Image (cartoon, grey):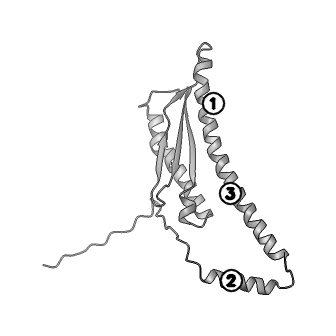
Amino acid sequence: MFRGFEGNNGTKLLHERGIKAPKMMKDMLYSLCEAVGNEEKKIRKLQSIGFIHSGLMILLLRLDSPAGYTCRITRTKMLEIPSQITQFGSKVLPVIMLAWKAKVCLIIFVISQMIVKETIEFIEQKQYSDDEENTDDQLQNLQNSCEFSPPRKKINQVVAFDSPSSKNKTKKR
């Protein structure tokens, strides 16, 4: 039997919106954090986007970590894809805009990453193409310059299912 939209308090929507989607999005964010080396500045820019479809209703979830150590979920209001052709023009445009906004968020992130990557490649190419004979000297200079830079700030995030075991502590009076 077809399970459609059961309302904002339907069990399917509550389970998807409250437990299932946020857990998957957080796992994706943790994977992204590991991919960027757990660097605080990069983690603050990461975000994970999820859609929940229930019948003809759609909801967008966005998970990010603006402080670097906790996750924040923002939700849009439920939007409906109309079943009547007379309402289609006025109600489908917000749904299309919702998908477009999610795509724009991802495109902006990808473009910024590409710009940074191209800049780094250009700088490395320029630095090493000037004098190819002194490659060892250039590498030594690069290593020496890195010794005086401040260490990168790394964040250790605790996964929810890895809780520390409690120890019984006795109080002395």
* Residue at the limit of the structure toward the top, as seen here: 86
- Earlier sequence position, callout 3 versus callout 2: 3
Residue 143 circle label: 2
* Residue at the limit of the structure toward the left, as seen here: 173
* Quadrant holding the C terminus: bottom left
Q: Residues within 10 Å of mark 2 (few under 14, many from 20)?
A: few
- The reply to whether the C-beta atoms of the residues labelled 1 and 2 are less than 8 Å apart is no
Q: Is residue 92 left or right of residue 18?
A: right
Residue 137: image location, x then y, percent: 77, 87
User: What residue do we see at 77% from left, 66% from top?
Assistant: 121
Query: Real-space Cα distance between discs 1 and 2?
Result: 50 Å
* Residue at the limit of the structure toward the right, as seen here: 133
Residue type beneath disc 3: Gln
Q: Which residue is mark 3?
A: 113
Query: Real-space Cα distance between discs 1 and 3?
Result: 26 Å
Q: Residues within 10 Å of mark 1 (few under 14, many from 20)?
A: few
Query: Real-space Cα distance between discs 3 and 2?
Result: 25 Å
Identify whether 127 is placed above or below 51.
below
Question: Nearer the observer, disc 1 or disc 2?
Answer: 2
Local secondary structure at mark 1: helix
Residue 66: image location, x then y, percent: 49, 55
Residue 96 circle label: 1
Q: Is residue 129 visible?
A: yes
